[in-house]
């Protein structure tokens, strides 16, 4: 019975030691934050600094804005909500954020899809891959780039480009794409039923 009565104090002791370790690791004055909000915060800080550069604000003007609006002299001291407010203010001040778009298809259509100089007869297989990519894109409702097929080839063989593949390796890509198309069709049919 005595052990049961001692348990709450042992538990509070354990919690106190755990918190002391956390403070030792993180340093004084810092709270444990989840990684998602920290990632959002870093993204907002990056936006703020991009906007500062694009608006051509010098250091004095920048610190004056921060001091006037938030009472701090560094954007690193702002909370998540304050950073969102600052981004909105900078947009109203004339900054137009642009999204850096990743190109859908780095390599584009492979040369061997239209003309195969090696005599391996890969044109038919490349047409089949192109048709499967189009069908897969249609079932998903988006564009499926040639890079998707190249990624399958890389995962299967280690080759980075479809131009380097022989007919046997292309057959493996066709099989994988066919399975993906069949799976996507099955999911689409199940959703429509």
Image: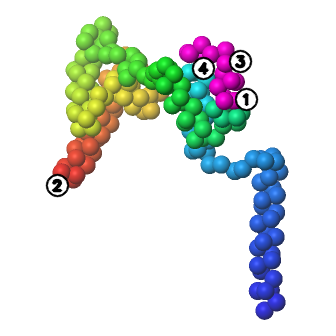
Q: Position of residue 156 (x, y in %)?
A: 42, 33
Residue placed most toward the observer, 43 or 25: 43
Residue placed most toward the observer, 19 or 174: 19
Residue placed most toward the observer, 185 or 62: 62
The residue at the point 80 percent across, 77 percent down is: 9
Which quadrant of the figure contains the N terminus? bottom right
Is tag 1's residue or tag 3's residue first in the polypeptide sequence? 3
Q: Are marks 2 and 4 in contact (CB under 8 Å)?
A: no
Residue 6 shown left or right of residue 135 in the figure: right
- Disc 2 versus disc 1: distance between alpha carbons? 59 Å
Mark 2 or 1: the one toward you: 1
The image quarter containing residue 63 is: top right
* Residue 64 drawn in magenta: yes
Is tag 4's residue or tag 3's residue first in the polypeptide sequence? 4
The disc label shown at residue 60, or none: 3
Is tag 2's residue or tag 4's residue first in the polypeptide sequence? 4
Q: Which residues are magenta?
A: 53-68
What secondary structure is marked by label 3?
helix
What secondary structure is marked by label 4?
helix
- Disc 4 versus disc 3: distance between alpha carbons? 12 Å
The residue at the point 81 percent across, 83 percent down is: 6
Mark 4 or 3: the one toward you: 3
Q: Are marks 1 and 3 in contact (CB under 8 Å)?
A: no
**100 lies above or below 174:** above
Q: Position of residue 84 (x, y in %)?
A: 55, 36
Q: Give the residue pinned by disc 1.
A: 73
Q: Give the residue pinned by disc 4.
A: 52
Q: Are marks 2 and 1 in contact (CB under 8 Å)?
A: no
């Amino acid at each position: 019975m005595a052990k049961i009565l001692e348990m709450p104090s042992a538990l509070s002791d354990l919690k106190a030691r755990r918190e002391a370790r956390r403070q030792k690791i993180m340093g004084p004055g810092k709270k444990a934050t989840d990684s998602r909000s920290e990632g959002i915060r870093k993204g907002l800080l990056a936006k703020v600094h991009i906007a500062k550069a694009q608006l051509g604000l010098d250091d004095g003007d920048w610190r004056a804005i921060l001091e006037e609006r938030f009472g701090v002299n560094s954007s690193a001291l702002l909370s998540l909500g304050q950073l969102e407010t600052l981004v909105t203010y900078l947009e109203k001040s004339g900054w137009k954020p642009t999204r850096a778009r990743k190109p859908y298809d780095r390599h584009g259509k492979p040369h061997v899809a239209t003309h195969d100089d090696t005599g391996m007869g890969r044109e038919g297989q490349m047409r089949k891959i192109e048709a499967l990519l189009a069908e897969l894109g249609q079932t998903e409702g988006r564009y499926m780039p040639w890079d998707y097929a190249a990624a399958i080839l890389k995962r299967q063989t280690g080759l980075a480009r479809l131009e380097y593949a022989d007919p046997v390796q292309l057959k493996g890509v066709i099989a994988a794409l066919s399975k993906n198309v069949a799976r996507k069709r099955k999911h689409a049919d199940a959703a429509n039923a």
